[in-house]
């Protein structure tokens, strides 16, 4: 029996569907991202928290309708045991990932003096500990596979600016951006780049309570130079671009995707 030469292994590898995990892809930006990778024929692991199976099923359908394959994996990203089990499931089904998208996040708007320790800890655990746990659980296999890859984490414009009712949340987003910078150094030598995408104001469920205030929506409409709040597909498109070979030299970066909202100060 002959052993395949390196060139034919590489040729087969080039036609292999990419394997992607998008955390928190039951709804919103994560769902649009899963569908975007589905459209390139990728295998997409659709992570969802307990209680959101029906939303995850809708995402899985979108991935498959777009031409990809979906694997639904339940895990609260803040829960180390659940994350470990999710990694075992994905690795057993498909092997190591090519692209990890850390997207899961929560923002329960609250006044500073109303934030108790329970709320503070939950936001920290889902948003920041979750990125640590998931990245650690999946990148070891990526390193061992030796194929390189991408870690793309959804941070926020809130990593750079504050929010009076997002005191707990903004700190987690600055933490995610920082985590990507350190991991860019740890994983870069293995060809795995780590970057943060910083969305501005995107129309999803996370903002529903805050945007019932029409004054806030009017303010955003006037502040964003492109003349609209963002859609989930605006962020999904940037995440997909960052997963492409042409982005290989971008590592440890923060990419603001806000329609120009931040620079429109005067
Ligand atoms: P969303 O509420 O529509 O989606 C949040 C997703 O996270 C959902 O799919 C939900 O199921 C999942 N999720 C929540 N808790 C989870 C947990 N413990 N484990 C696994 N999954 C969990 O909101 P979105 O706007 O799509 O948010 C996605 C990411 O984008 C978040 O990290 C958010 O902070 C970030 N972001 C959003 C905006 C915006 O304006 N919408 C701006 C900047 C950053
Ligand atoms: C984002 C950003 C948005 C906000 C969401 C919830 O990071 O601050 O403007 O509405 O969080």
Image (cartoon, rainbow, N blue to C red):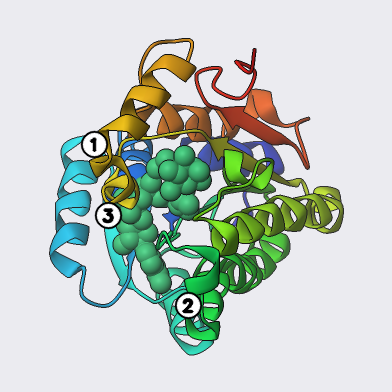
**Residue 105, how many percent across, how many down?**
45, 59
- The answer to whether residue 157 is left or right of residue 115 is right
**Residue 136, how many percent across, how many down?**
66, 71
Choose between 234 and 124: the one closer to the eye.
Answer: 124
| Mark 2 within 8 Å of ligand 1, using the beta carbon | no
Callout 2: SS: helix
Please tell me how crowded label 1 is: few (under 14), some (14-19), or many (20+) other residues with Cα within 10 Å: some
The reply to whether discs 1 and 2 touch (Cβ–Cβ < 8 Å) is no
In which quadrant is the N terminus drawn?
A: bottom right
The answer to whether residue 96 is visible is: no
The reply to whether discs 1 and 3 touch (Cβ–Cβ < 8 Å) is no
Q: Is residue 204 above or below residue 146?
A: above
Q: Which residue has dot 1 on it? A: 67
Q: Residue at x 71, y 65 (%)?
A: 144
Q: Residue at x 30, y 43 (%)?
A: 204
Q: CA distance from mark 1 to mark 3?
A: 10 Å
Q: Which residue has dot 3 on it? A: 70
**Mark before the other along the chain sequence, 2 or 3:** 3
Q: CA distance from mark 2 to mark 3?
A: 33 Å
Please tell me how crowded label 3 is: few (under 14), some (14-19), or many (20+) other residues with Cα within 10 Å: many
**Residue 165, how many percent across, how many down?**
49, 55
Callout 3: SS: strand
* Residue furthest bottom in the image: 81
- The answer to whether residue 193 is left or right of residue 16 is right
User: Looking at the image, is mark 2 or mark 3 nearer the viewer?
Assistant: 2
**Residue 260, how many percent across, how many down?**
56, 17
User: Looking at the image, is mark 1 or mark 2 nearer the viewer?
Assistant: 2
Q: Which residue has dot 2 on it? A: 119
Choose between 23 and 204: the one closer to the eye.
Answer: 204
Choose between 3 and 235: the one closer to the eye.
Answer: 235
The reply to whether discs 2 and 3 touch (Cβ–Cβ < 8 Å) is no
């Amino acid at each position: 029996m002959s052993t395949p030469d390196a060139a034919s292994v590489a040729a087969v590898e080039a036609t292999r569907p990419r394997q992607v995990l998008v955390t928190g892809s039951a709804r919103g930006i994560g769902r649009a991202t899963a569908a975007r990778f589905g459209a390139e024929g990728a295998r997409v692991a659709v992570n969802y928290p307990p209680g959101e199976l029906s939303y995850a099923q809708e995402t899985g359908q979108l991935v498959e309708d777009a031409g990809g394959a979906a694997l639904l994996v339940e895990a609260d990203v803040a829960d180390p045991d659940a994350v470990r089990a999710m990694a075992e499931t994905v690795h057993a089904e498909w092997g190591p990932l090519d692209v990890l998208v850390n997207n899961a996040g929560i923002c329960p708007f609250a006044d500073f003096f109303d934030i108790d320790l329970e709320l503070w800890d939950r936001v920290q655990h889902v948003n920041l500990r979750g990125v640590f746990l998931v990245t650690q659980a999946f990148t070891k296999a990526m390193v061992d596979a030796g194929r390189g890859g991408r870690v793309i984490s959804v941070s926020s414009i809130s990593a750079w600016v504050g929010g009076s009712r997002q005191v707990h949340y903004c700190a987690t987003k600055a933490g995610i951006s920082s985590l990507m910078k350190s991991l860019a150094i740890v994983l870069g030598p293995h060809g795995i780049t780590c970057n943060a995408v910083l969305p501005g104001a995107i129309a999803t469920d996370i903002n529903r309570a805050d945007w019932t205030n029409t004054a806030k929506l009017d303010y955003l409409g006037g502040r964003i130079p492109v003349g609209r709040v963002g859609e989930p597909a605006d962020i999904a498109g940037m995440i997909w671009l960052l997963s492409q070979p042409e982005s290989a030299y971008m590592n440890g970066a923060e990419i603001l995707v806000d329609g120009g909202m931040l620079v429109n100060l005067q």
